[in-house]
Image: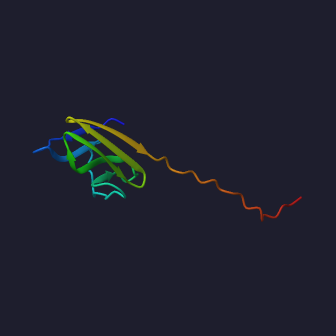
């Protein structure tokens, strides 16, 4: 999943943004793990993330949400990111065995 990375550190660190969409972002969602926020569409697709404080020389951080896991690595100002989104779980519907059968 390729996104646009925005990272302009001041004095060696700063916020890092990765955006996958140009549509309006809506409300920020706090992650279950990590320091930052995420923005999701109404259908749950990942639109954008912002990592709070990222060092420009050497950093490794993760934001973990209910259905998305975003990992960044920064080495000498070069940013790499990896996104893992969970697929919706399909529920198998059992047939009702209490039905009366007619012959």
> Residue 52 at x, y = what percent?
22, 52
Q: Nearer the viewer, residue 49 or 12?
A: 12
Q: How is the image coloured?
A: rainbow
Q: Tell which residue pokes out farthest to the left in this image.
A: 11
Image quarter of residue 60: top left
Q: How many marks?
A: 0
Return the x and y of residue 11 as percentages of the image width and height: 10, 45
Residue plotted at (30% across, 42% down): 72
Q: Is residue 26 above or below residue 46?
A: below
Which residue shows up at 63% across the image and 53% down it? 92
For the point 29% across and 40% down, the residue is 73
* Residue found 89% across the figure and 58% down from its top: 103
| Residue in the foreground of this view, choosing between 54 and 82 | 54
Where's the N terminus, which quadrant? top left
Q: Is residue 13 visible?
A: yes
Q: Position of residue 68 (x, y in %)?
A: 40, 49
Q: Locate residue 85 relative to residue 9 in the image: left or right.
A: right
Q: Can residue 20 be spotted in the picture?
A: no
Q: Residue furthest right?
A: 103
In this rendered view, identify the residue nearer to me: 20 or 64: 64
Percent from the top left, x then y, of residue 19? 27, 42
């Amino acid at each position: 999943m390729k996104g646009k990375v925005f990272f302009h550190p001041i004095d060696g660190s700063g916020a890092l943004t990765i955006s996958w969409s140009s549509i309006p972002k809506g409300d920020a969602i706090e992650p279950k793990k990590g320091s930052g926020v995420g923005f999701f569409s109404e259908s749950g697709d990942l639109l954008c993330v912002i990592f709070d404080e990222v060092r420009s020389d050497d950093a490794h951080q993760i934001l973990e949400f209910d259905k998305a896991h975003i990992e960044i690595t920064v080495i000498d100002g070069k940013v790499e990111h990896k996104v893992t989104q969970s697929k919706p779980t399909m529920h198998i519907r059992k047939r009702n065995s209490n039905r009366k059968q007619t012959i």
